[in-house]
Amino acid sequence: MTTPAVTSPGPATSAQAAPDSAYGSVLALGKPNDSLLAVVIVAVVVLLLLFPLLRHVIRKRGGWRRFRRGVGRELTLTRRAFGEPLRTYRRHRRGVRALARQLSDPRGGLLVRRLLDAAAAALADAPGAVPHAVRTEPGLAAVQIAARPLPEPPAPWETPAEPGPQRWELPLEEADGLSQGRPRTGAHLRPLPVAIGMADDACVHLDLAAGPRLITVEGDAAARGRLLQALAAQLDRPGSGASVTVTDGVHPQYRGQRLDAVLRDLEEAAEEHRETEDAGEFDESGRAATTVVVCAAPGREQARRLSALAASGAVVCLIDGRVAGHSWALRVDGRGRVVAPELGLDADSAPLGGAVAAAVRADRRRLRRESAPRRGTPTRQRPRTREHQPRELEEALRLEETLRLEETQTLPEETQALEEAEVPREEPSRSPLQAPVPARTTTGPDLLAEPAAARDRTTAASSGTRED
């Protein structure tokens, strides 16, 4: 019996076996195992159970249409809630820029006072009607008026088309046609407007001298402190027409006078001028200078004295906190919204601090530009070296002495004596390097010159603080 020979597979057999093994491994990887199949089955069962439940809930809520509307409303509210911080920041920056432009432009403050003066002149025949606030926006200005009832506006004033506080509106291109007459008799103080915030796209200004002249800032402690400091900084700017005295306690980094000392000085000044003046402090030109006192948390007796001074018209008081007496109250919340329902005011005061700071920086830059020498102005040249300075000075003095002797010989004796008495001889010790006296430059009050309707008060502002 012969044993068959065992032959090894050839190259062709090996090549056919390799693809079969690779194909088998691929099929093994693509087949789902038991755990994956169980997960798929469970997911399908859950979806089949949730669909009838979801359908039942949607039917109870009114159908698919109302359900879609509700889902869309919830998504919209969610998007608005997450986007509100960004919108608030953009609105804040926009308000800062608008208020900074208004406060930095000298013509802006002049326009506000001119609008108040013109409205007061137009209301001269309406007893009890007082313009107390101004709203300015691009192309339009509105003056809010406290009156019952509101008189018909004369030209160029217009009646507002939209509902709101009692006001007269005026297109800014017609501002040149405003009346230049004086306000009604008895208006001792000129308008004292300050910006209090933004209402939509309008800058809101309040005339502190239009009412009881006692203004309190109430509400959130931090917000009312910022608002009071911003109002005081506006009044202390050049051209505001106020002399500001800030007492101790208004700003943590500023130590002012004690309130008792300020009240004592004001009462003494009012007593001295009571015989010749009913209100205000008049200078030599006959115009009234508005004195503003800014204080914080006065006592009961101090509040009574402040109320008496404000009622007499001697001062305008800005107070941090509530006090007893006839006053205007500005209530501000933690977000900076300031309201005064009795005055028809509702504004956002949060951008006011940054805008006032920008306006103060603009004032400083303007004063530096005005004090700098203008281009083309001849300047006094200095000597090139120190060695030639004594010789040049000696020659200049010798020439001056020669000219003086020649003029003295030609003039009579009386004229010679008068000239020698009026023109003293220059001493030789004076150095030609001495800086010349700078010429008078235009300051902030000169830029904010008042029109004829508002020239019954001064425009110089300074801070009247001193140490006890």
Image: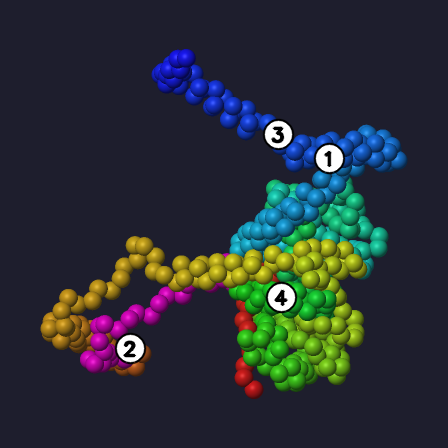
Q: Say few, some or many: other residues with alpha carbon within 10 Å of mark 2 (under 14 / 14 to 19 / 20 or more).
A: few
Q: Earlier in the sequence, mark 1 or mark 3?
A: 3
Q: Earlier in the sequence, mark 1 or mark 2?
A: 1
Q: Earlier in the sequence, mark 4 or mark 3?
A: 3
Which residue carries the number 4 mark?
Answer: 226
Which secondary structure lies at badge 2? loop
Write the start and end of the magenta stretch as one range. 424-449
The residue depicted at 78 percent of the width and 31 percent of the height is 48
Q: Position of residue 402 (x, y in %)?
A: 15, 74
Which secondary structure lies at badge 1? helix
Residue 390 located left or right of residue 196 = left
Query: Which dot, 2 or 3, sits closer to the camera?
Result: 3
Query: Label 4 to label 2, Cα distance in Å?
Result: 58 Å
Which residue carries the number 2 mark?
Answer: 423
Quarter of image, res 34: top right
Q: Amino acid at mark 3?
A: Pro
